[in-house]
Amino acid sequence: MPKQDAQMQRKVEHLFLAEKFFTDESFADFDSVRLLHDALPELRLQDIDLSTNFLGSKMALPIYFNAITGGSRQSAQFNEELSQLAHKLSIPVSSGSMGVYLRLPAETKASFTTLRENNPDGFVMANVSAKANATQAQETIDLLHANALQIHLNVLQELAMPEGDQEFFWLDNIKDIVSHVSVPVIVKEVGFGISQKNLAQLYRVGVRNVDISGFGGTDFAQIESARNHELDLTYLDRFSLSTVESLLESLPYQNKMTIFASGGVRTPMDVIKAIRMGASAVGMSGLVLHHLQKYSLSEAEIFFDEFTKQLRLIMAAIGAKSIADIKKAPIVFDENLINYMKQRNIN
Ligand code: FNR
């Protein structure tokens, strides 16, 4: 198979395998966190304001559809629906990695531009790997008239892929992209989390927005192991940082960086807990992929309408009238997380 076909094929396999391995059970450690309710919230349900400042733009909800796909026929169909759903909900939506567009613009362009066409005034994010150069990164931004750029860090995924990279010198390149592109940059993981050391490194090169995207949902060790018949890395599932652990790691950086959370988000309560732990907004890939693949666009709309209603209910129950108020809710960690914080010197 020629190389370009293999890259497009990979996109199809990722969509198929992510859905195959999707489970409602989350391993992101949200169950290790409890929020306490407020028996005297002194508020009216209809006064609760879910609007969120997303990198300077006002969004209707504190959630976004995180990077998934682009570059194949199936991706085009998927992005078509994904962007319609994002438009309906007035939430940000990301493209999947646009590396394939940079190599094969004519063949793959439409699978990406649909994200903007269906969402002319919406918040759309381009997505490149940490080895793209600044000119290429700007090209992807221009194609989508993107409001932000995501740069993904995916060492474990690359190592697990038969065709993956084996050299990882990314920091200088990230620095160059951040200082040259025309929109804010979010550096993100792809489901293995980001440590305090990595946040320090990213801060030093000028990164101010990070999506910690931790372990607990879509698991690329599992997905790539299913594609790679010579290497089985499924046993690595508890090797990386869970989304909750990674949010704890981000605590010392939350006053100087904007932290986004994703990885294993399944319920409105997971969203509220992630915000309470410092996330500015909360991303989902596996969950929306599942609802669009297994059901239909109209059923996914019903699901996310209900999701939104429940965000409001939980906010009422903890006495939060606004997203900022969520950060004041009392929170309790289980012993495992207390132990994690002690060993990692997190207060
Ligand atoms: C992804 N993800 C991803 N991330 C990225 O930055 N660029 C990409 O191209 C992709 N591709 C991709 C394909 C598929 C099929 C899925 C499900 C996911 C990772 C994604 O943005 C997110 O970081 C993780 O999936 C963790 O979130 P969930 O899926 O547990 O909500």
Image (cartoon, rainbow, N blue to C red):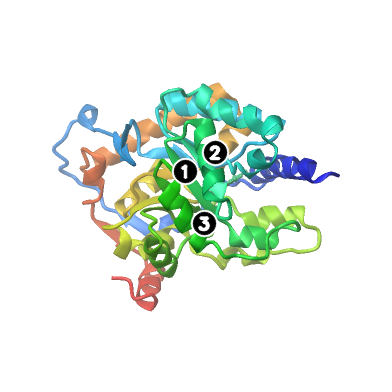
On the rendered image, what quadrant is the N terminus found in? Answer: top right
Asked whether the viewer can see residue 4, the reply is yes
The numbered mark, 3 or 2, whose residue comes first in the sequence reads 3
On the rendered image, what quadrant is the C terminus found in? Answer: bottom left
Q: Please, is residue 137 above or below residue 168 in the view?
A: above
- In the shown orientation, is residue 13 left or right of residue 218? right
Amino acid type shown at disc 1: Leu
- In the shown orientation, is residue 292 left or right of residue 120? right
Asked whether the beta carbons under mark 2 and mark 1 sit within 8 Å of each other, the answer is yes
Residue at the right extreme?
1
Residue assigned mark 3: 27
Residue at image x 44%, y 44%? 181
Circle nearer the viewer, 1 or 3: 1
What label does residue 57 carry, if any? none
What label does residue 140 carry, if any? 2
How far separated are the C-alphas under marks 1 and 3?
28 Å
Residue 253 spot, x, y in % from top left: 32, 61
- In the shown orientation, is residue 255 left or right of residue 188? left
How far separated are the C-alphas under marks 3 and 2?
33 Å
* The quarter of the displayed image where residue 52 is located: top left
Asked whether the beta carbons under mark 3 and mark 2 sit within 8 Å of each other, the answer is no
SS at circle 2: helix
How far separated are the C-alphas under marks 2 and 1?
8 Å
Residue 27 spot, x, y in % from top left: 51, 56
Amino acid type shown at disc 2: Thr
**Which of 269 and 147 lies nearest the eye of the viewer?**
147
Residue assigned mark 1: 149
Q: Please, is residue 298 above or below residue 283 in the view?
A: above
Residue 329 spot, x, y in % from top left: 23, 51
User: Alpha-carbon neighbours of circle 3 within 10 Å: few (<14), some, or many (≥20)?
Assistant: many
Circle nearer the viewer, 3 or 2: 2
SS at circle 1: strand
